Amino acid sequence: MEVIIQPNQEAAADLVARVVARDLRANPHLVLGLATGRTMERVYRRLVMKHREQKLDFSLCSTFNLDEYVGLFPTDPNSYRHYMDHHLFQHVNIDPRNTHLPNGMAENLDKECDAYEKAIHRFGGIDLQLLGIGKAGHIGFNEPLSALRSRTRVKALTPVTLAQNAAFFGGAENMPRRAITMGVGTILESRRCILLATGEEKADIVARAIEGPLTGMVSATALQLHTHCTVVVDEAAAAKLKEVEYYRWIFENEPEWQQFQSE
Ligand code: F6R
């Protein structure tokens, strides 16, 4: 795992968007794993700008989102399909047939989860997985005590998650209670993953995820097992980390990051 600290949330989102753009230019057939949430909106805004201003080409890439609420139609403004259309897909030249989210309205949810895993496999696996982190440490909707080897399945959302997203639904009582989510094991199979966390409200959980012991109580700690995982944080989200000097040194000295310092 490597940790990169950027001065603020804009710079952190900018770095993540630049990594995605670099990988997409290097491999137009890139299979991208995508996350939703407030943090990612800034990344998608930048990718849309890069498409418009630098002709970043999405025509051959494919995407798989981490999760979708159970019981919401794709047209529901709170569905993650709607989020993705609104923040990214409608504004770039991606082929909608290459964009994938679990179907939260599927008649047989277990079959849907199985089919989702198979589709990821058929596309050759995920090259670059984007991740956010919930206040209780979830990645995707892998709530506390998710098995570290779990696959795509239905999970009940915890009260912390309901509180985190209740505002979108006009109150937690209107929120779906369950979601389909890629498993921790599914996420760990991505070739590379980047977790983006910004803001002081994420500082505690970021410190537990990066510097704390591996535990099913904080799904994001499983990323310590990933062979190529980068965590990008702003100063506010980095506030509770102990080894910041070391992380800054890595960013300044690892060859991969040199090109991102000079741009
Ligand atoms: C959503 C997802 C979640 C979010 C996390 C952070 O697809 O996978 O794990 O990334 O809840 O959400 P924000 O960015 O709204 O704090």
Image (tube, rainbow, N blue to C red):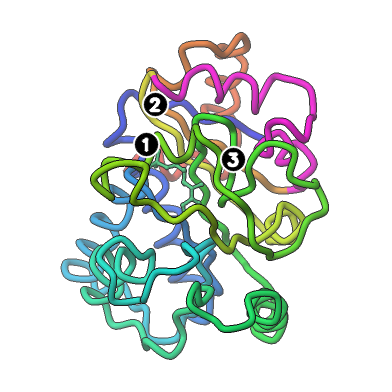
Query: First in sequence: mark 1 or mark 2?
Result: 1
Q: Earlier along the polypeptide chain: callout 3 or callout 2? A: 3
Q: Residue at 60% of width from left, 35% of height from top?
A: 254
Q: CA distance from mark 3 to mark 2?
A: 19 Å
Q: Nearer the viewer, residue 93 or 79?
A: 79
Residue type highlighted by circle 2: Asp
Q: Secondary structure at mark 3?
A: loop
Mark 3 Cβ and ligand 1 under 8 Å apart: yes
Q: Quadrant of the C terminus?
A: top left
The image quadrant where one finds ligand 1 is top left
Q: Position of residue 45 (x, y in %)?
A: 23, 56
Would you place residue 207 above or below residue 215 in this image? Answer: above
The answer to which of 181 and 18 lies nearer the viewer is: 181
Which residue type carries mark 1? Ala
Question: In x, y percent, where is residue 184?
Answer: 72, 52
Given contact means CB atoms under 8 Å apart, are the residues at marks 1 and 2 in contact?
A: yes
When asked about the image quadrant of residue 14, the answer is: top left
Q: Where is mark 1, residue-wise?
A: 12
> Is tag 1's residue or tag 3's residue first in the polypeptide sequence?
1
Distance from disc 1 to disc 2, alpha carbons, whole Å, reads 6 Å
Q: In the rendered structure, does residue 67 fall within the stretch colored magenta?
A: no
Q: Which residues are magenta?
A: 201-227
